[in-house]
Amino acid sequence: MRRDVTDITIPDLTGRRALVTGASDGMGLRIAERLAAAGAEVIMPVRNTGKGEDAIARIRQNVPGARVSLRSLDLSSLDSVAALGGVLRSEGRPLHLLVGNAGVMTPPHRQTTADGFELQFGTNHLGHFALVAHLLPLLRAGRARVTSQISVAARRGTINWDDLHWERRYHGRRAYRQSKIAFGLFALELDRRSRAHGWGITSNLAHPGVAPTSLLAARPELGRSTDTPTVRLVRLLSERGILLGTVDSATLPALVAATDPAAGGGVLHGPSGPGHLGGPPAEQELYPPLRRTEDAARIWEVSERLTGTEFPTT
């Protein structure tokens, strides 16, 4: 039998417009549903329209009157990211919340994005970096909270500066760690630059601990035809309430980071249980790989060059 996990109270979000990536299933879907239940208008940009429509139907069933809508987005394609940015800017409506939740994890063999980047670095980090760049006018107009979902994997490891795309020797887990470290460094640098230039954006981080999501499940498109032994073990421990969280509890740190008025910029939220693998959400110390401001500035500059985007200096 599972132990109960403390829930959180989300403030009234009526009149707020939110965007959640990776909202067609798993944690992203739960985050989108909770935001909609609190009154937010939620934009769900998805790659798979069928899954997105199923997700919308579920939210509307559980939250009558929910204001939710689909958009098209493939984070592994910079053209797709730019297209979504253009669509939303043409609508001209401010964004108040952005939760960067989508991601891919440890394909067994090296894969690349449409733009030739290593898949995890390109999707988990560069795609989100470019998305924020394209949406910056709307985020500034909404004085937005931007929450970047990283991982416990980011507590160790480093950026492979000499081979960012793992062309010489691919290692799936290290490439995944790099993608999440880079994404976390970007989130911290976004908050610093927003304060320096008066953008009005608050940027923080969250991680879900460990929970039975689809990241390590069978994903034929990633070259993984069956569930990994790791995800089977995670499901077993989660079901028995041993150390790990559930999909529902794993959403709570991101929801706190995105909606709690007291959640500041440059702060990491995660589960507070042993090893930060499960348990109620709490503010946590930044992981060592995220503490070097020079690395954050460097990954920002590299990411601008790779994505062909440029943030203003005013």
Image (cartoon, rainbow, N blue to C red):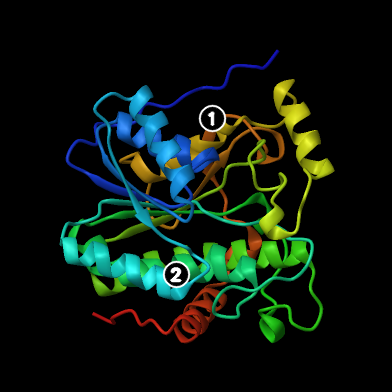
CB under 8 Å between discs 2 and 1: no
Note whether residue 194 is visible. Answer: no
Tell me which residue sits at (25%, 62%) in the image: 88
Residue in the foreground of this view, choosing between 117 and 253: 117
Amino acid type, residue under disc 1 in the picture: Asp
**Front residue (pair 303, 49):** 49
Amino acid of disc 2 = Phe
Q: Residues within 10 Å of mark 1 (few under 14, many from 20)?
A: some
* Sequence-first disc among 2 and 1: 2
Q: Is residue 132 above or below residue 213?
A: below
- 237 relative position to 199: left or right: right
- Write the residue at 30% across / 47% down: 18
Q: Looking at the picture, how far across and down is residue 16, in whole percent?
A: 22, 44
**Total labels drawn:** 2
Residue 280 position within the rendered picture, expressed as x and y whole percent measured from the top left: 55, 30
User: Where does the N terminus fall, quadrant-wise?
Assistant: top right
What label does residue 161 carry, if any? none
For disc 2, the marked residue is 129
Q: Residues within 10 Å of mark 2 (few under 14, many from 20)?
A: many
Residue 259 placed where, x, y %?
34, 41
Image-based side of 67 in relation to 55, left or right: left
- Looking at the rendered image, the quarter that the C terminus falls into is bottom left
Q: Position of residue 172 (x, y in %)?
A: 76, 64
Q: Kindly state the secondary structure of the residue where label 1 is placed.
A: helix
Which residue, given by chain and number where applicable, does mark 1 sit on?
248
Please say whether residue 48 is visible from this viewpoint: yes
Q: Is residue 158 left or right of residue 207?
A: right
Q: Is residue 52 above or below residue 150?
A: above
Q: Is residue 12 left or right of residue 218?
A: left
Seen at 55% across and 75% down, the residue is 114
Seen in the picture, residue 252 relative to 308 is either above or below; the reply is above
